[in-house]
Amino acid sequence: MIELADGTRLRTWTTGHATSGRLPVVLLHGGPGLPDYLAPVAGLIDDLCLVHRYDQRGAGGSAWEGEHTVARHVQDLASLLDAWGHERAVLAGHSYGTDLAAYFLLAHPERVAGLIQLAGPFLNPWREADRAAQLARRTGEQQARLDELDAIASRTEAEEIEYLTLSWFTDHADRDRAWEWALAAARALRPVNYVMNAQVRASEKADPLEAHVDELRERLPAGAVIIGGEGDSRPAGALRRLGARLGCQVAIIPDAGHHPWLEAPDRFRELFRAAVEQASRRR
């Protein structure tokens, strides 16, 4: 646990080992409102460098009540870097974590030595394509049940697990294992902080990343890369468009969805390790 200036205590994990030739990597999980789930991703690189993870304020073991903003979460990350003793680090975000990494780069470019974005960020227009893909992957009965559960103000534990599974199984390209993976996540990543989710999303809407693409391109560290899955319900084309605007490498894995380390572990490991080896090298 690391205590911040306002007294909030964030749960953190550190694995791997520090070396003189490599900078640390900080993994930023998605949500917002979920606890960290990136231990398997950390395990792919902790033989290379020091790897930090944490539960974002208000999620998992980082209990907190108050108004959530992107700016507050950016400041949390800066405070954690201070507590860990790092002037600079490589940021590797997943899903919403890619948004957080991008906002941090805008605010503190001097502290970002490398940027690896996993399954994001998705800049508009993309939501209509995502909704269409989700509808295509659910049966009519599944969609009706999801709508029914969504309308319940206070779901039971069993209803919440069912709701999250129905919400998340469309993330995966492998339709044979999609339900299995989503159910496992629904059982593990609770409780979801829905208030945090709504407030962070509102904060993003008030200051969208779309308005800062030129600034991001100017501040982007060398070797930045976006890694996504062609089978994500969110359109891979949106990642390709962003990569073209930023002038950075984009690697789209054909048989993977929103969590490519699950569906294409060998190819993801190859791409991710190569990105970390390049980004974490001290210059």
Image (cartoon, rainbow, N blue to C red):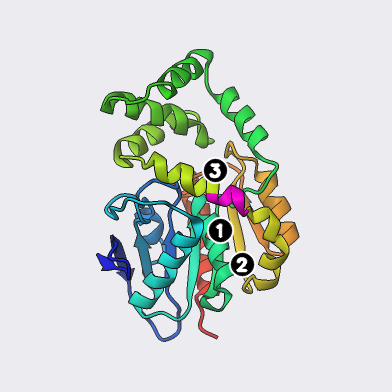
Q: Amino acid at mark 2?
A: Ala
Q: CA distance from mark 2 to mark 3?
A: 21 Å
Query: Which numbered disc, 1 or 3, marks the residue closer to the eye?
Result: 1
Res 133 → quadrant:
top right
Give the answer, above or below, for where 161 lies relative to 241: above
> Mark 3 or mark 2, which is nearer the start of the sequence?
2
Q: Residue at x 51, y 77 (%)?
A: 111
Q: Which residues are magenta?
A: 203-207
* Picture quadrant of residue 43: bottom left
Q: Position of residue 226 (x, y in %)?
A: 60, 58
Any part of residue 48 in sight: no
Label 1 environment density (alpha carbons within 10 Å; few <14, some 14–19, many ≥20): many
Residue under pointer 2: 224
Q: Is residue 68 left or right of residue 244?
A: left
Left or right of 112 in this view: 54: left
Residue 245 falls left or right of residue 209: right
* Magenta segment main secondary structure: helix
According to the picture, the residue beneath numbered tag 1 turns out to be 117
SS label for mark 3: loop
Residue 120, position as x, y percentages in the image = 58, 51
Q: Secondary structure at mark 1?
A: strand
Q: Is residue 128 left or right of residue 61?
A: right
